[in-house]
């Protein structure tokens, strides 16, 4: 009886720790995604998803990085772990408002906040996975930020509004959390 009880406790707790692992299968250390074997609504095999994420704030933090940016990693990790080919995904992150500080390079972030940018590795991992970051040029000018202060390969658009409208008109699903 005692052995059965201990085995049950061991199984329950060990599966909890495996389940709660913060490491994503594709974007390492970010984008916690849990397998859902009991799901009844399934996407077609190998979906081609087009999404634009609205990164408008930096106050929502998960483990010291921007939760809004982390949700992009979660989307990619969820689909990667179910076997979907994420190279068919087209994902944009339109960054404006206070979110702009999370795409500053380490030197610019350090000069403003006294430490390296905790979001840099997340942004770079997402870029390597094909996510394109576009900063609002209006926010950039208002905040006194130069293009050279952004993480490498972050694009600058005229405005977040015009970029969001353009991408939605092209069929990208708008995601704001």
Image: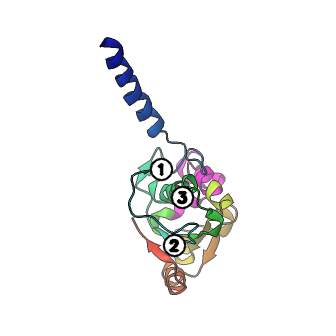
Badge 3 element: helix
Badge 2 element: strand
72 versus 32 height, above or below: below
Residue 151 appearing in the image = no
The residue located at (53%, 64%) in the rendering is 100
Rendered-image quadrant of the N terminus: top left
Badge 1 element: loop
Q: Which residues are magenta?
A: 100-124
The residue located at (46%, 68%) in the rendering is 97
157 versus 40 height, above or below: below
Residue 62 coordinates in the image, percent (x, y): 44, 48
Label annotation for residue 52:
2
Label annotation for residue 33:
1
Residue 63 coordinates in the image, percent (x, y): 47, 44
Q: Earlier in the sequence, mark 2 or mark 1?
A: 1
Residue 21 coordinates in the image, percent (x, y): 49, 39
**Label 2–label 1 contact, CB within 8 A:** no
Label annotation for residue 79:
3
On the picture, is 84 further left or further right than 70?
A: right
Rendered-image quadrant of the C terminus: bottom left
């Amino acid at each position: 009886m005692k052995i059965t009880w201990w085995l049950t406790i061991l199984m329950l707790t060990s599966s909890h720790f495996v389940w709660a692992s913060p490491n994503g299968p594709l974007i390492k250390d970010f984008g916690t995604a849990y397998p859902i074997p009991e799901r009844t609504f399934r996407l077609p095999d190998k979906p081609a998803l087009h999404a634009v994420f609205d990164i408008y704030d930096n106050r929502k933090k998960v483990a010291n990085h921007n939760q809004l940016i982390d949700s992009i990693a979660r989307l990619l990790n969820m689909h990667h772990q179910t076997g979907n080919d994420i190279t068919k995904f087209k994902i944009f992150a339109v960054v404006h408002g206070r979110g702009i500080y999370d795409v500053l390079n380490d030197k610019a972030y350090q000069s403003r906040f006294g430490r390296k940018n905790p979001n840099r590795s997340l942004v770079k991992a997402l870029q390597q996975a094909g996510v394109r970051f576009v900063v609002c040029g209006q926010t950039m000018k208002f905040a006194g930020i130069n293009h050279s202060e952004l993480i490498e390969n972050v694009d600058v658009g005229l405005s977040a509004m015009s970029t969001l409208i353009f991408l939605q008109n092209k069929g990208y699903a708008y995601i704001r959390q």
